[in-house]
Image: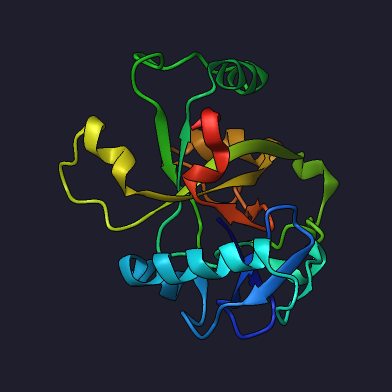
């Protein structure tokens, strides 16, 4: 199933179901007003959204509208939590080499994590603005997941059961701000502005053999 959020409808957008080939969509705000609301009642919302998705892919007489990526916000225009883990080792080596830093102890066993800003994300086709090019703006292509409530102390084996949706992320970095900021010892803040996400998120079954 593919879900997205229209920009219209307030700061959390309006929930839509998008067909498999990304050409048509239907409003789903009678099931939940926005994606965050759907996540909060996921056990109830999931079968209703799945039924709508199946109809959208198999029926031609439904009241649909064209899917236009520029009219979409990130699936979650804002979120309660945004945590980023560095698991791509080559990327870690390159960015640390660029700022003259060593790889951390245990990097191949435990991912580095930081808590990013989640009060507002950039839309998938919105401009990424910067005040000064000397800040060294850069992008990072990432895979992101949306979870339900993950209990404290969850095991590795149990964790995957809490993944509800998957999407892509353009994680923005200001490389020339990052090094002096990290040297202060408090981690990322000014050097990590708002990220952007793909215009739709998908349930794991959409990935087929790749999940």
Measured as percent of width and height from the top left, residue 105 is found at: 36, 14
**Residue at the spot 76% in from the left edge and 66% down from the top edge:** 24
The quarter of the picture where residue 173 lies is top right
Measured as percent of width and height from the top left, residue 91 is found at: 61, 21
Q: Is residue 201 above or below residue 170?
A: below
* Nearer to us in this view, 71 or 87: 71
* Nearer to us in this view, 132 or 161: 161
Q: Say left or right for 47 vs 127.
A: left
Q: Say left or right for 128 vs 90.
A: right
Q: Say left or right for 75 vs 188.
A: right
Q: Is residue 147 above or below residue 207?
A: below
**Residue at the spot 28% in from the left edge and 58% down from the top edge:** 149
Q: How is the image coloured?
A: rainbow
Residue 77 visible, this angle: no
Measured as percent of width and height from the top left, residue 34 is found at: 52, 76
**Residue at the spot 28% in from the left edge and 39% down from the top edge:** 159
Q: Say left or right for 153 vs 180.
A: left
Q: Residue furthest left?
A: 153
């Amino acid at each position: 199933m593919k879900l997205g959020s229209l920009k219209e409808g307030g700061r959390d957008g309006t929930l839509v179901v998008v067909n498999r080939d990304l050409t048509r969509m239907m409003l789903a705000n009678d099931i939940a007003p926005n994606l965050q609301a759907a996540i909060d009642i996921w056990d109830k919302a999931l079968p209703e959204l799945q039924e709508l998705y199946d109809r959208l892919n198999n029926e031609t007489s439904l009241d649909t509208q064209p899917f236009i990526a520029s009219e979409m916000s990130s699936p979650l225009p804002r979120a309660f939590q945004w945590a980023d883990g560095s698991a791509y080792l080559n990327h870690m080596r390159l960015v640390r080499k660029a700022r003259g830093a060593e790889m951390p102890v245990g990097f191949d066993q435990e991912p580095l994590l930081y808590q990013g800003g989640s009060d507002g994300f950039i839309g998938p086709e919105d401009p990424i603005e910067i005040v000064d090019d000397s800040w060294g703006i850069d992008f990072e292509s990432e895979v992101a997941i949306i979870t339900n409530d993950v209990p404290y102390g969850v095991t590795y084996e149990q964790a995957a059961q809490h993944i509800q949706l998957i999407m892509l992320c353009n994680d923005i970095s200001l490389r020339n701000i990052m090094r002096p900021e990290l040297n202060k010892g408090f981690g990322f803040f000014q050097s990590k502005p708002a990220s952007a996400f793909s215009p739709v998120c998908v349930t794991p079954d959409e990935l087929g053999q790749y999940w």
